[in-house]
Image (cartoon, helix red, strand yellow):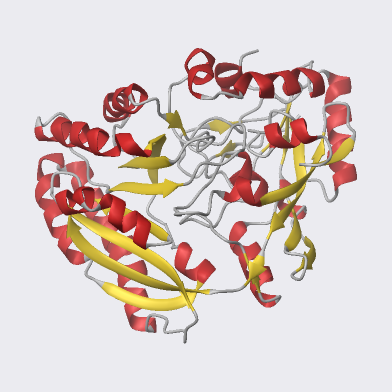
Amino acid sequence: MTKTLWRNWADTHRMTPARVVTPNSTAEVAEAVRAAAAAGARVRMAGSGHSFTDIAVTDGTLLLPTALAAVRAVDLPGGRATVEAGMRLCDFNDALAAHGAALTNMGDIAVQTMAGATQTGTHGTGRASAGLAAQVERLEIVLADGTAVTCSADHEADLFQAARVGLGAFGVVTALTMAVEPAFLLHAREVPMPLDEVVERLAELRADNEHFEFFWFPHTDRTITKRNNRTTGPARPLTEFRAWLDDEFLSNSVFEAVNRAARRLPRLIPAINQVSARALTAREYVDASHRTFASPRRVRFVEMEYAIPVEHLPDVLREMRAGLARGEHRVSFPVEVRFAPADDVWLSTAYGRESAYVAVHVYQGCPYEAYFAALEAVFTAAAGRPHWGKMHTRDLSYLEKVYPRLHDALEVRERVDPQRRFTNTYLERVLGR
């Protein structure tokens, strides 16, 4: 037994598992799964805790993959690299860069473990490049009977399709083979724009940029748009002072202080947002892709994000603005909007449809339930799919309506984990018992 208290990054969930195991190898993961089965215990593996839901929570055996964090191989000519489950994305980026390689796309936070990021469907924004799971070519996974298998599109294809974004429900992922390419530079342009102009020019902005996203400041008509496009260089990174000023001082230190003030005096939030929106001015630079995609995020928050069919985005934004205009909520965090092409990963939020991602955040310690509930009604009216690792209230009865291959995935689950060794309260809600 253990008295270890585990909590996630946002402190939305805590647990005290019966047993904690830190495996050093796939064989040790398999041994831990067999031991749990013998004891009739459930098994979950936690990553860096960046999921806001209780997806990692267990009362049984908790696996912590901190020692399962090596790069096994980088084959740049073959366009692939194999990494163990517990390596953080930021460390994998550095290891790839040392070999002259890079991932095609990623999200704007890079501290998640590789398994955690892919299992929950972490994504970035891209005109033609999809989320991390779409870049997975092979998975090494320990099944409920303690056997380790490797699956791909050519071997155990159904398991591969179900487990690429698998929520840890099909087994414990111990290693991933990712598609990689030669390292490249991105030309980043960040430009303030009125929200109405962004919506009016959305088709143009998405078509003209490989990676386009924007942040809208609630209670204002202001956004900051971000456009990243490949370039042959030369590299022109931000000066050390400008990087510190924008990404550390303004976006973290000052933003933390602003949100603390807003938490105490919520009536001031609309005025605060007007100032915050003006503080981030235009900037332009050229840097390595992984340094351009990801940014430090040290201000803690709670987040909900839905993927909606991209054609519904203008109507969803209109509904969101109307709710804020009625004074129903006071929100100090920007709303983040990103895009992804359709992919073929069964449980990906972008499966089979071009998607717009709308992410809403609330500063840690502030009430979020009413705000999230109001917006969840808007998102689900547009057939939205919730991010698996972010706050939502959907269950199987809803999710089976918006995921065409969900029941195919559940058939795979019945085959590889009939005793539900890997389930927990969260999975019982979203996938059933």
Comparing 212 with 247, the one in front is: 212
From the top left corner, tell me how far across and down residue 84 is, in percent.
76, 53
User: Which quadrant of the view contains residue 279?
Assistant: bottom left
Decide: is 89 above or below 433: below
Comparing 77 with 141, the one in front is: 77
From the top left corner, tell me how far across and down residue 195 is, in percent.
18, 50
Q: Quadrant of the C terminus?
A: top right
User: Which quadrant of the view contains residue 375?
Assistant: top left
Decide: is 189 above or below 297: below
Q: Is there any visible trace of residue 21 in the rendered image?
A: no
Residue occupying image coordinates x 47% and y 63%: 293
Decide: is 288 above or below 122: below
103 vs 277, left or right, is right
User: Which quadrant of the view contains residue 88?
Assistant: bottom right
Decide: is 376 above or below 345: above
Q: Is there any visible trace of residue 91 in the rendered image?
A: yes
From the top left corner, tell me how far across and down residue 167 is, in percent.
63, 33
- Which residue is the extreme one toward the bottom? 234
Residue occupying image coordinates x 44% and y 63%: 295
